Image (cartoon, rainbow, N blue to C red):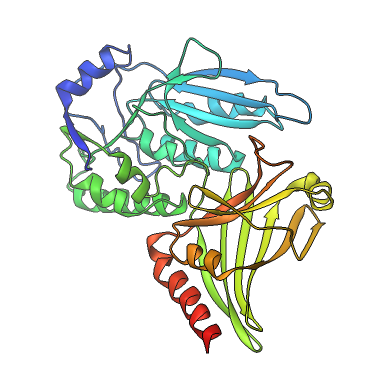
Amino acid sequence: MMGVRIHSVDLVNYFKKRNLIFGMKVKLDRLLVMLGTLLCGAVVYAVPLTIQVEKFNGLPGVFDPGVLVYLDGEIDSTSPKRVAAALDKLPNMQITIVFNSNGGNLTAAMELGRLIRKTGASTSVGVKGTEEFNSLPGACFSACTLAYLGGRYRYFKQGSKYGVHRAYLTSSTNGRDLEVGQVLSAMIGSYIREMDADPELLDLAVRIPSTDIYVLSDKELKDLQIVNKGRLPPSWMIEAVPGGSYLKGMQETVYGRGKAIFACIDGKFILFSVYEAGPKAKLISEGKWIHSLKVNDDDLPLGSPAKIEGVDGFINATFFLSRTLFQRVAAADSVGHAMQPFKDSPTFVGYSVDIDKSSRHRVRNFLNNCMTDRRK
């Protein structure tokens, strides 16, 4: 499913309904010239960025304290400092920045994104709802889309909009429009890569006339690594060791890091599982927890681990797998390890590593070769 285009008039009407009409100015730091305005092609009125903090105190030992910081309005040159001052008052808390903005100052947006990344906050798109900790759909257009990328973990309220377009210059640059435009594109491209998003986002934006906004589809948001829903890209590799090799998959998520290692040793299929469980690692490893192999959305019984220990906040476990389980893994889109305190528990501790398109061939080849070698 592809995204859709919104013309400037429709964009103004969209934000009028939400009392969010603002200009979108672009300033290129100290590059000799003023770059002028980054607009949708219509004259609009500016509403300064508002900052609203909603705290959740949590439950000691159960839920960590958290905060939603709603940023609503135009991102101007003062926004990064004002947001930094607000975040300084929220130490040792899990922070999610929720954007609802039509854009603003481009360099200020990138400065804001870097501030968010430095603080370790997550980002989302939405507006504050009537109920606590419940956001409603919002919009993030133009320069806002760059600030949003600052979140290491990036979420998206269903029904929200994320839209891009090509910048254009309205003020004179003394005949240096092409040069300035190239520098601006380089800055944006470098920033997008720095924020772990796909550089094709810039390629998409420059194809959209400055009089339009292109709203990305859910598939595009995922494929371009804009929205990750609390999961960084996975890493799968094959590493050689004396006497053989093993397949290692790793992924970092908002819930911790997980590592699944598969090997065939002495005719046996083996899973080495490593999960960052924090202070509870030793307690969990010493308990009689129920262990499952997570394959896509299924939880398959693993039985008792051959070995398990909690060391330095990590749970290290070894399991011998049947050929059937190995075959399931070879055909999976994600695989991981779940630990439950009792059977049918509604909650679990553990992880899942995605097997993305770039890794699928490597993973399946290794596992299938492993099973073939064992039959010899």
Image coordinates for residue 354, horizontal then vertical, percent: 48, 56
From the viewer's side, name the closer residue of 182 and 280: 280
Give coordinates of residue 342: x percent, y percent.
Answer: 73, 41
Front-lying residue, 197 or 248: 248
Judge left or right: residue 29 versus residue 90: left
Residue 235 is situated, as x and y percent measured from the top left of the image, at: 51, 63
Q: Report the quarter where the N terminus lies.
A: top left
Report if residue 170 is visible in the image: no
Determine the image quadrant of residue 273: bottom right
Left or right: residue 218 versus residue 331 is left
Q: How many marks?
A: 0
Residue 12 seen anywhere in this rendered image of the structure: yes
Q: Nearer the viewer, residue 16 or 363?
A: 363
With respect to residue 196, does 92 lie above or below?
above
Is 352 drawn above or below residue 341 in the view shown?
Answer: below
- Residue visible at 15% across and 39% down? 209
Q: Is residue 9 above or below residue 282?
A: above
Task: Please give left or right for residue 83 compared with residue 43 in the image.
Answer: right
Residue that appears at 20% across and 29% down? 40
User: x and y percent of residue 244 in the render?
Assistant: 61, 86
Q: Residue drawn 30% across and 37% down?
A: 34
